[in-house]
Amino acid sequence: MSPPREPLRIPRVVRIAAAGLMFTASILCYWQIQRDGERNEGRAGALASENAPVLTGNEPLTTDVAWRVVRWLGHFEGRPHLIAGRQHRSTLGYGVAQRFVREDGVVVLVDRGWIDAGHVAVALPAMEAGAESEVTGQLRPTFGRTDSVATSGHGTQIWPAKAWPSVQTAMASPTSVYVVSGAVDGGQSANSHAVDGFVRVPARDQTSLHYASQWFALALLAGIALIPRAATRVRDFVGA
C-alpha cells in the first residue's frame, strides 16, 4: 500500500483568487435559480388551468383567471397597434394589439396574432372597430417593460416586443391580463385577418438552469482549489 501523498501546496494568491471566484460563482448560481423561477412563472398556472372549462361570463379580470381560455361577445374598438419583430415561421412581420370591449363594458387588450409586414396596409383597416363579434383565446398575465415608448408607422403605433404593460397603459386597458386570441383548441381563429393561436401550456425554459449548472461547476472547482487535501484526493482519483 503506497503511503498517502502530501497535500498539494497551493499558493496563497491562488487560494484568495479561488475564494473570490467561489463566492461570485455561488451568487450567480443562486441568481440564475431565481431567474429560472421567473422565466417559468406562469407555467404552474397554465398547468393548473389546462383542463379548466372555458370562461364565457363577465368574470373579473385579475391574475386569478390568467391562463384560462375565454369566449366572449363584444366588439373591437379603435385602430390596432403593432408589435415589432414578430416572426411567423421564417417571415418577419408584426403582432397586432387591439382593444376589445366586452358586453359588460370591461376593456381588455387582445393579441390578435401576426401579420406580414407587406400586408399591413390591407390588414389593419379590416381589423378596425366593427359590429358585435366574438373573441376566443387564452388569458395571459401581463409581463414586460413598463417604460417602453412606441414609434409611429403604418398609420398607427409600433411597440417593441415584451412591452405589454406599456401597450396596455397607452391603449387604456386597466386589467392585469390580456387575451392571446385563437380557437378554443389553440388553433387559428376562423376568418381571422391575422395568424393567431396559442399553446395552453408553454414549454419549460431551461436557459437559467443551464447557466446555474455552469456557475455551480465553477464554484465547485474553486472550492477544491481552496482545500489542499481535496485537491490531493482529486489528483489521486484521476490517477495524476
Image (tube, rainbow, N blue to C red):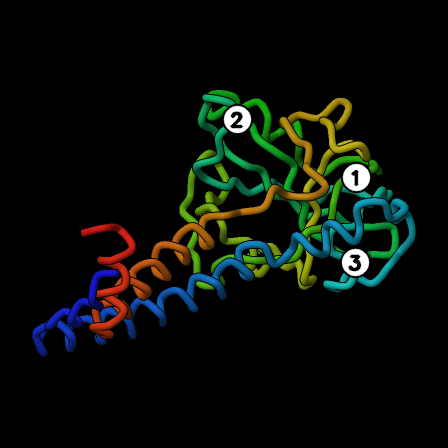
**Residue 96, position in %: x, y?**
58, 38
54 to 48, vertically: above or below: above
Query: Where the N terminus falls, by quadrant?
Result: bottom left
Question: Disc number at residue 135?
Answer: 1
Judging by the rendered image, the residue that carries numbered circle 2 is: 88
Residue at (48, 45) in percent of width and height = 157
Amino acid residing under circle 3: Val
User: Would residue 159 appear left or right of 135 to someone viewing this image?
Assistant: left
Query: Pointer 1: residues within 10 angstroms few (<14), some, or many (20+)?
Result: many
**Residue 145, position in %: x, y?**
47, 59
Judging by the rendered image, the residue that carries numbered circle 3 is: 65
Q: Earlier in the sequence, mark 1 or mark 2?
A: 2
Amino acid residing under circle 1: Val
**Residue 63, position in %: x, y?**
72, 63
Q: Earlier in the sequence, mark 2 or mark 3?
A: 3
Mark 2–mark 3 distance (CA, rounded to whole Å):
28 Å
